Image (tube, helix red, strand yellow):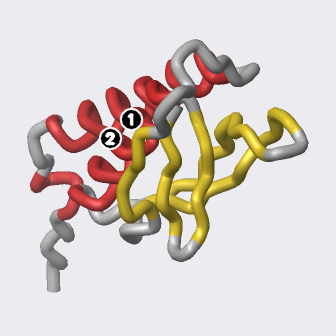
Amino acid sequence: MKQLLVAAARISAEDAVADAVLDYEAELIEHHRTARVVIPVFMNEGDTLCELFLGRGAIDGALALPNTAGRRIVGSEAAVRELRERVRVLREQFSAPFDEDWYSVPARDD
């Protein structure tokens, strides 16, 4: 389990979720985009959901927590799949060649 460092707060998520959030945040920043995500996290009271606004450097990093191996949070696998898919789609959108004709303004006949 890792804690995502967000401002002065710490959010505990499974390693794969934390890694996927960091990867998605980096991709959003690279392409000057933002996005809202909801991820499963662990709080003292149990598992819950956390909403994050990514793309502006919201996540400062991640801190690996000792003695948490094997701790599972419900919904983590689905969250990782969704985040990885978002990264794939974002990369695909920006890897397409730039279409200058789409942005061109037709000449006026005066």
* Res 23 label: 2
The amino acid sitting under disc 1 is: Asp
Q: Nearer the viewer, residue 88 or 19?
A: 19
Q: Which residue is located at x 40 percent, y 70 percent? A: 56
Amino acid bearing label 2? Asp
Q: Quadrant of residue 12?
A: top right
Q: Position of residue 40 (x, y in %)?
A: 70, 35
Residue 28 is left or right of residue 69, and the answer is left
Query: Residue 83 in the image: x percent, y percent?
Result: 48, 32
Q: State the image coordinates of residue 52 (x, y, percent, origin top left).
A: 61, 57
Residue 97 location (% of width, % of height) = 10, 40
Residue closest to the eye, 104 or 45: 45
At 38% from the left edge and 64% from the top edge, which residue is drawn? 60
Label annotation for residue 74: none
Compared to residue 57, the image places residue 10 above or below, namely: above
The secondary structure type at the circle numbered 2 is helix
73 horizontally vs 37: left or right: right
Label 1 near label 2: C-beta < 8 Å? yes
Task: Please tell me whether residue 25 is drawn above or below residue 21 in the rendered image.
Answer: below
Q: Which residue is mark 1?
A: 19
Q: Residue furthest bottom?
A: 110
Quadrant position of the C terminus in the picture: bottom left
